[in-house]
Image (cartoon, rainbow, N blue to C red):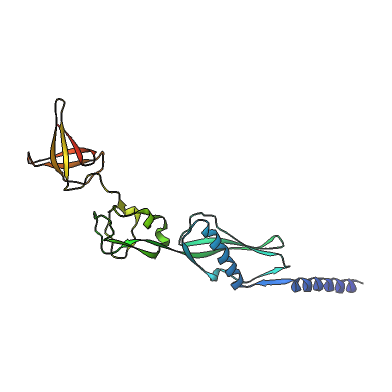
Amino acid sequence: MNKILSITLITIITLFSTVFKVNATVLTQGYISLEIGKQAQEIIKREIKSNINIDIDNSYISSVEVYGNKYKIQVLCNSEKFNPITIFKVNILSNGSLVKTFGVPVKISIFETVAVAANNIYRGEFLSSNNIKYENKEISFIYDNVMKESDTPEGFIANKIYRQGEIIDKRYIATPPDVLMHTPISIIFKNDDITVSLDGEAMDNGKIGDYIRVNNKTYKKQYKGQIIDNNTVMVKL
């Protein structure tokens, strides 16, 4: 009797195993990789409107066997800011149940038409149509700091040396000063009793509120004063 029961149980187990095997689907590495790529692009495009290329590290992906025809590959990213290499989380579900979860590194390359140095640009030099041009560049590492044509970089001042072909980085440029070095200015000399205005020359760059050196040719002497307006410096005596 026991022998018959054992044979029956083995038969039932074998039958169920066969049924499950018949209904099994193998999700290949290639299929999973394509699905990750598709979903990853959709996620990235929600935040980045530029042209992008992605490269998936397939060494982190292996074939997965699921049962039944209701399976799903779910790709997630916890960050809204994408690094040049970003880890995406992948969940594989079958009939609503989690079968496997793993992370996949995705290399993200972003391309945009941006301002670059047309020739060497030196520190303190103004950006202009003579020394910058616009080219399609890979900008993944400085995506948030590039200058597009719509940003109107002309007129800014370089705060570093840019080599020919180098991307203009907004972290290393400055807005033009209100007073330029070696340009004519009006110097207002003031004390408690009198105010006198004379022509002079700025010896430094500066913005309104800054203190700079000024030169008065009449008295052949340098003073230090505060910029109070475009090309106007007040020296308190």
Residue at (39, 62) in percent of width and height: 113
Horizontal side of residue 175 vs 1, given as left or right:
left
Using the rendered view, name the quadrant where residue 220 is placed: top left
Q: Is residue 230 above or below residue 106?
A: above
Horizontal side of residue 230 vs 197, given as left or right:
right
Q: Position of residue 94 (x, y in %)?
A: 70, 64
Residue at (39, 65) in percent of width and height: 136
Residue at (53, 56) in percent of width and height: 46
Q: Position of residue 231 (x, y in %)?
A: 21, 42
Q: Position of residue 78 (x, y in %)?
A: 54, 55
In what quadrant of the picture does the C terminus appear? top left
Residue 120: tell me if it is visible: yes
Name the residue furthest right: 1
Q: Is residue 227 above or below residue 74?
A: above
Residue 146: tell me if it is visible: no
Horizontal side of residue 27 vs 59, given as left or right:
right
Using the rendered view, name the quadrant where residue 20 is placed: bottom right
Camera-side residue: 32 or 65? Answer: 32
